[in-house]
Amino acid sequence: MIRPKYVINLLSDNIRKTRNPLAIPNDLINKWWDGVENNGEWLFFTGMLYQLTPYIETVVRYLEKFENSKLEGFLSLSNIIPKFLFRLISLLTSSKNKSEANEILRGIYSLLNDAGIDVYYRPELDCYSGILLYDFGDDEGFEEHAKFVAENLEKAGVKKIVTVDPHTTYALKVLYPKYAGKSFEVKNYLELLEGRISGKGNGKVVIHDPCYYGRYLEISEKPRKLLESIGVEYANIRNSGNLTSCCGGPIEALSPKISRDVAKLRLEELGNGRIVTMCPVCMANLRRAGGNTEDIALLLRRYSNGKAD
């Protein structure tokens, strides 16, 4: 296992200096939004997690080589060479994975727009939520970052926010009122789409519930209702909903090998069929372990006819 101190110090330093855990400028990774509305009722807030995940996959791939080796100590020096290290990561990251992340975000935005929800996007207000700092126990760092993000949103007059992933949703809805002292009306896109789309899909999928949706936000019924509304069958497995099993993603930065093993155990529960999830971290980690995984947004976009009757 990689020393937690190395990882936490690196993430904290990057977020403090660049507001991004990988120190890659947002304008280099956030390119999905060309042509969308910049005024409306609901601010589309990505939290940058979909955009960051392809780069995180690259980092994890190399961390797995460092783990339990003499190279592990190199991570303790990474805070003095972030520009070199993370520019290299950007070059090594798959264009296919970047394009898929952009497609998912455009798909979610289009689903909301087609369903009649007045959604808009302003890239200068979008920012990483800081959730990794919270997950790794850096409460002080998380509080500082949460206040920065929340104050920017408040200054811009933002009242309503629609989120796209479980980590960002939990951060803004549950943690920001506590740590930043700021509250917004926060809805996940799965909640806003309920009852608003229909379609005639086909096939059957197995649902992997992300931990934050299943255990903490308790909205696991939302994706199931949406799949029903577009005519796609789904299978429930024993460990699902608020009893969902972890994908292994939360520890991938500390032990990529253990993270992969946890994902393999989860895949044994999910079976060999087509797996649908709604979290970029879950999707990436299950795929890394060999899973046939797709984001639910792509499925909804593929089969949705737009507004429900």
Image: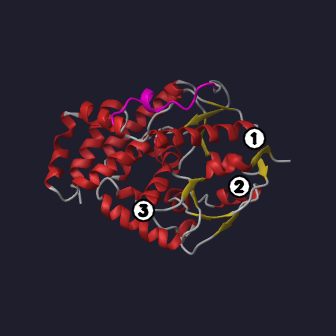
Tag 2: residue type?
Leu
Q: Is residue 280 left or right of residue 227?
A: left
Q: Would you call the spot at circle 1 few (<14 residues within 10 Å), some (14-19), or many (20 or more)?
A: many
Look at discs 2 and 3 and give the one toward the viewer. 3
**Dot label at residue 115:** 1
Q: Secondary structure at mark 1?
A: loop
Work out which quarter of the rendered image holds the N terminus and state it.
bottom left
Q: Nearer the viewer, residue 182 or 115?
A: 115
Is the residue 259 above or below the residue 9 in the image? below
Q: Which residues are magenta?
A: 22-35
Residue 39 located within the stretch drawn in magenta: no
Q: Would you call the spot at circle 3 few (<14 residues within 10 Å), some (14-19), or many (20 or more)?
A: some
Is the residue 102 above or below the residue 295 in the image? above
Secondary structure predominantly adopted by residues drawn in magenta? loop
Q: For mark 2, what is the residue?
A: 226
Mark before the other along the chain sequence, 2 or 3:
2
Residue at image location 61% in from the left, 53% down from the top: 296
Mark before the other along the chain sequence, 1 or 2:
1
Residue at image location 48% in from the left, 46% down from the top: 171
**Dot label at residue 289:** 3
Q: Is residue 307 left or right of residue 145?
A: right
Residue 31 located within the stretch drawn in magenta: yes
Tag 1: residue type?
Ala
Q: Would you call the spot at circle 2 few (<14 residues within 10 Å), some (14-19), or many (20 or more)?
A: many
How far apart marks 1 and 2 lie (CA) works out to 13 Å
